[in-house]
Amino acid sequence: MLHARWHEVKQSANPPTSRLAFQELIQNALQLDVAFQGWESSITPAWRYEMSPNTPEIRSTYSAKWQKLFLGCRGAPPEIHSYPSMKRCWIWGFYRTSRIFLLRDTLEMLNWMLRFPEPSVPLVPTGPPPTTQGQSVSAGLSNRSLCLLHSVTTSHLVDVIEKSCSAMIGSFTVPIYLKSLEDVCGMRGYISLWPLGVMDAVLSSGLVPDSNVASSPPMASHAPTQSPAYSHSSLTQQQMSPASSDGHPSNTQLANHDSYATAPQFSELASIRPKTEGDQVSSAASSPSNNTPIYDHTAKKGHIFDSNPAHPWDHPFNLPLRELGIVEPRQIDVAGVREWINRLLYYLASDLGIKKALYVPLTEGYMATVKPAVDHILGR
């Protein structure tokens, strides 16, 4: 419901024009992520999974096929998760992918908010001083507060993506009743397809900082070098004013249909062409502004697993984190992880028969890289 509401806000003919207009929406997003974290921390031991570091010693316990395909190549996750049942893999995959949607939406909201000027508490010389609530709202929507939220939310997104990748090997190796590991079981691929596609879409969006991109030069700073302790719940309670929601989505109907459901069949894949630079939505107006661009309903989606075409303000821009004394968020090898994801997608299509899994490597330009590598490993 929050995801749908956010996309309705972006596509509105009268989009928000200030940070204050986002107050309820961003607080709901933060509270929902606290609930996601609470679910994971309170789940019973019977529903947990086992974690091992992805080291040569641990990898040696898997077959040479899995080692070469997914565990020992570029972009492989730092951990390996194992599950006792396919159902457990499925539920954890839904949990993490749903949270990825939430974290992506939260970062997009923050990117919008940071493009508006900071709100100020009005000071009227002859009138009463500003209320405590007014001061709290202003502080909660300040550049520093929003940049701190952005950094922590980005780190959470990187962490969830890494854990989701770590779980993938479990989908292919968990025992299935009356099935051997050599049997072709399409269900192993189906429960991985949605998480893999969503992760590739998020990594292609530019929201995740790339560890292989040279960092910007240090900015002049007079702020402390260490940021204060932070948690979503404490910031929500202390810096954002109370807000409530009736929890009901609006009646706005989405105009575009599900592009994934209408993806071409395998016989039509030869006609697909990778997207070009002209298909990318450029970032716009990184400086504070009161003029919100209107959503282009005729734009193309940047990725087949995106919910809708992007708005220019969804994209990140250079944030003054160092200037504000905020720790830089976690980074990830975006190109390496995307190549790893597309290796899995090609494997799903070529060995498990899920032909629509080819759509992402084809459109994102990874076929020339992943197909020869996977075919060589499998002796084709």
Image (cartoon, rainbow, N blue to C red):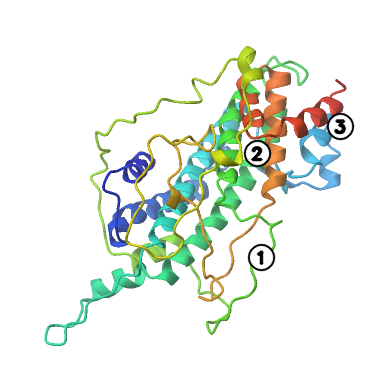
**What secondary structure is marked by label 2?**
helix
Crowd tier of the residue under label 3, counting other residues whose Cα lies within 10 Å: few below 14, some 14–19, many 20 or above: few
Q: Which residue is mark 3?
A: 64
**What secondary structure is marked by label 3?**
helix
Front of the two marks 1 and 2: 1
Q: Which residue is pictured at 25% across the width and 75% down the height?
A: 121
Mark 2 vs mark 3, CA separation in Å: 18 Å
The disc, 1 or 3, on the residue closer to the chain's N-terminal end is 3
Marker disc for residue 215: 1
**Amino acid marked by disc 1:** Ser
Q: Which residue is pictured at 31% across the width and 58% down the height?
A: 23
Contact between marks 1 and 2 (CB within 8 A): the answer is: no
Q: Is residue 123 above or below residue 30?
A: below
Indicate left or right for 266 with 379 as reference: left
Marker disc for residue 167: 2
Position of residue 164 measured from the top left corner of the image (x, y, whole percent): 61, 41
**Amino acid marked by disc 3:** Ala
Crowd tier of the residue under label 2, counting other residues whose Cα lies within 10 Å: few below 14, some 14–19, many 20 or above: many
